Structures are given as C-alpha cells and as structure tokens.
Amino acid sequence: MSEDERDRTPPGDADLTRAPASSDGAGEQIGPYRLLQKIGEGGMGEVWVAEQREPVRRTVALKVIKVGMDTRQVVARFEAERQALALMDHPTIAKVLDAGATAQGRPYFVMEYVQGEPITAYCDRHRLATAERLALFMRVCDGVQHAHQKGIIHRDLKPSNVLVAVQDGQAVPKIIDFGVAKATSHRLIERTLFTELGVLVGTPEYMSPEQAEMTGLDVDTRTDVYSLGVMLYELLVGALPLDPKALRQAGLDEVRRRIREVDPPRPSTKVSTLGEASAVAARNRRTEPTRLASQLKGDLDWITMKALDKDRTRRYGAVSDLAADIERHLSHEPVLASPPSTTYRMGKFVRRHRFGVTAAATLVLLLVAFAGTMAVQAQRIARERDRANREAETAKQVSSFLVGLFEVAQPSEAVANSITAREILDKGADQIERELRTQPEVRAALLTTMGEAYLSLGLYRKAERLHSEALRLGRQTAGPGSSEVGKEMISLAEALSRQARFAEAERLDRDAVQLLRRLPGSDEVTVAKGLVGLAWALHSQAKSAEAEAIARESVAMYRRMPRPPDRGLSDALDTLGSVRFNKGDYAGAEPAFEEALDLSRRALGAHHPKTLARAADVAAVWVYQGKYPRAEEAYREILGAQRVRLGPEHPTLTLTLNNLGAVLYFQRKYQEAEGSYREALAINRKILGQGHPDVALNLRNLGQALDAQGRYVEAETSFREALAIDRKAFGGDHPDVAETLSFQSAALRHMRRFVEAEAAAREALAIDTRRLGPDHPRTKEAGGALGLALAKQRRWEAAEPLLIAYAAALEAKTGVEGDFSEVARQIVEMYDAWGKPDKAAEWRKKLASK
C-alpha cells in the first residue's frame, strides 16, 4: 500500500488496514502456526504472516482478536467474518484454511497469504492502460457477485481490500477483509449480530448513501455496486469522486450529508480539473491527459455514474450487470447505462428543496386545478368510452371470425378429421387478406393471434409475415409509441429468432423493452417477456455475460410480481438455465431447468410441447453428469410424446433427436446416434432451410458419429459443410465455429492430415479463449485437439502441456468431451518416443487403472 492510500484510509473497528510490518510478538506459537511478522492491524484484530510446518509446510495469513478486545460484540463480528469467508469459494476471494482459539481463548482463523498490493497501486505501478484496468476490475466484480450469490454483502469494498498478486505470470485480484460483511439470506453465526445505530459502518470515501444513513435497514447488494463504482472511478481517473481531505475535515453530519447529496463530477470532467495531477494520472495509464478525458467521455462516464447514482433504484441492480456493461464497452457494443434525463435531475432538485417547491407548486395548482378538472374529466370519460366501444367491437369481430374458420361450408367438407390445423390457418390468412382491408384494428388483432399459432406449428416464415403486417397496422392505428406496437415487436422478434436472425431479433427486443418502459403504467409481464427474448438473442450470438444479466433481470422482474404467470417465469428460468449450461455451469443450470419444468407442468400440463422441451433440458444436464441411461430413457419418452403432439416434422422434434443422439454417442452406440442425427438433419433441412444454424448443429453431430465409426472422409465432409453454414450465419468469431473446427481437427488427424488438423485446432482454441475464457470445457477440448495434432508431428514440447491439461480435465469429468484412453495412449507414445520412460510408465499405470 502506498503512503497516499494509507493516509486516506482511516483506521477503525470497521476498517482493517495493512499496518507497517511489525515483529512485536514474532515467534509466538498459535496452534500449529508460528507468527513471523505482523502485516495488518485494525480496531479489533491483527493479521500476521505465519508459518505452518505440519501436516503441510506453507506460509499463511493468520487473523486473531487483539488482547483485551474479546468482548461479546467483537467476538461475534469476528466469527461472522470467519463464517462469511468459509461460505465462499472463488478464485478472487481469499480462502479460509483453518480456525481455532489461542491458549488464552482468543479466536483466530487462517487464510491463504496474499502477497499483493492494493489494486490502484498495482495498476499505477505497472502503468496499466484503461482497457487493462477494466479487465482486472471485471474479475473483482466476478468475486463480489459470487459473494452476493452466497448471500454476503461486503460493505467495505475499497482498493486496500482488493489486493493484486501475481500468480503464474498473471495478475490475480483477491478480495479480503469481510469484517463488516452482512448476510442477506441466513445468519452467519448462531446468535444474531446487530449493527449498532449511530455507527458509521465502512470507509466514508467508498460508502454508499444508504450506509451513511447509519440504520443498516436499507443496505443490500447495490451498496457494494456503489463502492465498486467509487473504485472504478479511482481506477479510471486516479482520484476519488469526493475530495477525501474535505470529507475528513468535516464533522460526522456533514460527511453523511455529502455522501448522500453531493453529486461527483463525471470521470472525464474530473480528469480535466486535476491540474498537474492529470498528467501523472495519464502517464500511469500510458496516454495523455486530453486522450484520457476523451477515453472516459461517453460510455465510461455513463457506466461509472450509473454505479454511483445516489438513488439506488437507478444503479445497476447487480454487480454482474455492471460487469456486463463494461464488457459491452470493451466489445464496442451499446451500453445499457445512459445519462440521467432532465426529468430525473428535476426530480432530484425537488427532493433537495421539497418544502419550497411544494409550497410554490401548491399555490399554482390551487389556481388551475378547479378550472382544468371538469374539462379534463369530460375528455377522459369520452375517450375511455370510445376506446372501450372500439375494443368490444374488435373482440366481437375477432371471435366471430375465429369461429367461422371452423365452420364447414359444404356437407362434402365434413371429412372434418382430415382438415389440418395448418389448412385452417391458411384459410384464415387468405380471408383476412380478402375481407378485412377496411378494418385495420380487427385485422391487426387477428394477424397477431394467427402469427402465434403459426409459431407454435414451427412455421416461422409465415409467422414472421403475419407479425410484420400486424406491426405495420399497429403503428398506423395505435401509434408508433403505443404498447400494442411494443408487444407486436416482441412477437416479431421471436419469429426472427426462430429463423436464427438473432441480430435483428436483438434490435427489435431492445427497442420494444425501451418503448414499453417509457410508457406510464406499462405492463410488466410484457416487459419481462421482451427481456427473455432479448436474453435468448444475445445468448445465441455468444454474448454470454449480457445474456445472463438480462435473463436474471427477467427472472427477478417476474418474481417481484404479486402473482407471476407460471408460463412466463418458466420461459425466463429456462433461458437463464440455457445461458448457464452453455457456459459449462451445469450445477447452476440444473435448478433453473428444474424449476422451469415444474412451472410448465403446472401451467400447461405434463404433455404440452413446452413442458416436454423443459424435460429435455433437465435431461441434458444428466448427460453432462454422466447419467446416460437415465437421460436416454427420458429422451425416448419425450420423443414419443412429441411425435404424437407435434407430428413427424417439427423443429422442436429435432432438438430431442439431437439430444438422444448425443446420449447414444456418449454410450458408444455410434450407429444408433447416427440414425438419430440423420433424422434431425432431414427434418431441419426441409423446414428451416439449408443455411440455418440448426442444420449446422445436425451436421456437426453427425460428423462426430461418423468419425467414431472410422468413416473419416464422410465425417470431415460433414464438418466442412457445417463450418460453411456457421461462418455465414455467425461470422468467423463464434463458439459454434470453434466447436466445428475442433471436431474437424480430429477427423483430419485420423486421416493423417496433421498440418491441417493443427491449423483447425489453433483457430478453434483462439476463438474459444477469446469468447468463452480459458477455463470453459470447449476451450479445453480445443486445446486437447491442438495437443493431439502437435503430438502426431512429434512436436513434443509444444504438445505436452496441452495433452496433460486435456487429460486432467477429462479425468475430472467437468463436462469436457473426449476419450481419456485415447489421450492417455498418445501421452504414453509421446514419452516413449521422447526418451522419458519414467513418465511413460506413470501414464501406463493410469491407463491400466481405467
């Protein structure tokens, strides 16, 4: 920690600061730990570097209550911190290793020793550019989000509690000091721990307005969002939002007032007013002051100020939302944060001067109220009467029209059972075109209803045509800014999404949600439905972080409703589960899928097509948990029910056929898997067209089944065709492209085209590392494919780490696909040829034990 940082971080019971290293007490033995050096001291505790010699030898950090401070309240706070840390398991949160009490009865606990420095000091010392600082900050956000998911609010986030250590050449942030953490969903200790009224909990410079109230009643996860906003401001600007000297010199009431009411300047404005300090800040970010201000203007100003909003309802709802907006900025995508409107600023002015404004407004209102009331009331009554009459007439005509569709005009038509749903819909669409040209409102309502019916039948192009026309009529009759138009945009977006036109669907869903949210008293159910559609469109474009944030928002919105619709909440949970599943978070996907299934059963019945699709999602998790027989049985049952309900050719059917093929493939029933994949491919080619990404998925799966049967040329042809479709649909930088390349690499390797196999695997690894991250199962699969291709070229040094990592991932069964025996045999062959018999013998033993 730098001297400047120590100066602006005041010691106190709520703030464990890193004190200068001390040797007073060094050599003392506490349990199996020998104290070496004191590195931190706060109001209630001390932190020591300690050495453990048995049963393992390691250096740790030991925190112990200070002599004389073991009061009931301090012990309770200490135990709460220890329990909070024990609940969490995340690479950016310091781990608890042990706990106990000294011979004198003072509690202590042992954590991993983080040899790091505060995040701001680390960034400045290494002169990290703005983008590099943001990437590091996003990892901190991941850790705080993990704490929130475990029900823990830190309440004292600041640079000195986020240390950056270098591990394996990589900067790794570690969040420490949960000494004033608050649990949201459970008690951290058996006895209740109360925050004393009138005690300022936290560090003033990083404290949220609700913390400054000193009641503790309104503190939730958005408090940590605010503190992260202050930290982000400091990382970007090199200065705090509020002047720390002025804040420290003020009395307690003035400190609280400033935290609650004084709006800081935007980061770009602050940089411009720092004087000589701006040159230092810019130099630490490898740029010039004017360029730094320019970098911060716009997105980063908006993101930071949204996190720092005094009104917590306008802050980011979750830390993951803040991280997702930063990711959007780094990806050059539109951010969700936007500058406060004039109306909002006026609202804040009114809140600050409420008595004066209220008096003036009351006087004005009294002068105009009586004169305006009667005229407004009369207009409103007339308008509502006319609207009600129009809606009643429209409903009557829609009902009459739909009944007429099922009437048989001639006795010879009474082969009623031979008339299909599609024939009835086609007949209705023709009638709407011919008979309702002069009734746009009725026509729009019917087109919407029939568009939904076409969607359920899997006739997506027809549905798109009807919804497009309904949207045009809605803009004409209800107006472009009406709720009817917003609803129709969401329906059209779904039709586009089903055709894999995800970018178009995303734009429509975004516009619809923004339109509906601007309307007074907008329908929350429709907004939530729009968010579900938006999350799916983002997920399908591999924009995982934003997709998960939007899906969470939709789930939260449904849950806030007094009586949330089961069907809508089921859709939201299923989308959230799908996003988590594709990230490789199978443990997180399973509860979302299971709840979605329960809700769908309750709302639609056990045999409804949507319920069957939800059941297939749950079975997909079983596949990745290795429960193959159970998953196969479920898929066969679902497939049988779907054939009865949906007929022999429906897009939903192909999803189940794909999943059944996958579970057969994992059980090495390759010929059966091939049959399942071919049936899915035939249906999708006929219904969706040759260029649809679902066709590429079928081809990719078919290629795997062919490759496993030794039909390498057929497999490589299948992969090449899938690759062409995916590149055209998604561009070159998409995880689906990478997955196809990984599989193609295997087929090429089996055909002894090793150089081509290496090139395909390298491209796959680059895409997956960039889009999914180094720890995703698909990234590990791509690394394994590259290792195998290199090994076949006898490039042992380059192949070794990739093969070892791939084999470890397969052995750990973390959702990574591949044959452990094949990889282990290749490792044995490599070490034999490389002249390393000891290592070859070690891997022969592993292979024999499988």
Image (spheres, helix red, strand yellow):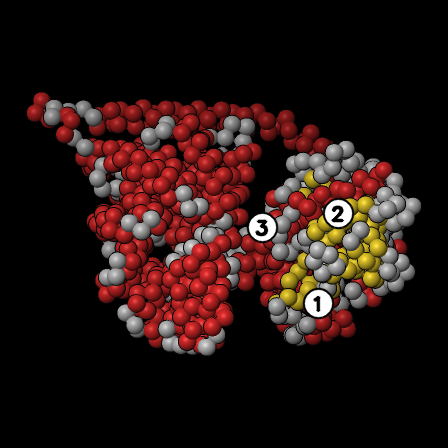
Q: Quadrant of residue 734?
A: bottom left
Considering depth in this image, is 694 or 465 the residue closer to the camera? 694
Is residue 616 something one can see in this rendering? no
Residue 271 vertical placement versus 506 (above, below): below
Is residue 549 something one can see in this rendering? yes
Residue 273 vertical placement versus 626 (above, below): below
Whole-angstrom CA distance, mark 2 to mark 1, is: 30 Å
- Element carrying mark 1: helix
Identity of the amino acid at label 3?
Ser
Residue at the farthest top position:
411
Considering depth in this image, is 323 or 17 the residue closer to the camera? 17
Identity of the amino acid at label 2?
Ala
Q: Residue at x 84, y 47 (%)?
A: 102
Indicate the quadrant containing the C terminus: top left, top right, bottom left or bottom right. Answer: bottom left
Q: Quadrant of residue 456?
A: top left
Q: Which residue is mark 3?
A: 320
**323 with respect to 602 (left or right):** right
Q: Which residue is mark 1?
A: 122
**415 with respect to 798 (left or right):** left
Density class for disc 1 (Cα within 10 Å; few <14, some 14-19, many ≥20) is many
Considering depth in this image, is 625 or 293 the residue closer to the camera? 625
Density class for disc 2 (Cα within 10 Å; few <14, some 14-19, many ≥20) is some
Whole-angstrom CA distance, mark 3 to mark 2, is: 31 Å
**182 with respect to 792 (left or right):** right
Q: Disc 2 vs disc 1: which is toward the camera?
A: 2
Q: Which residue is mark 2?
A: 99
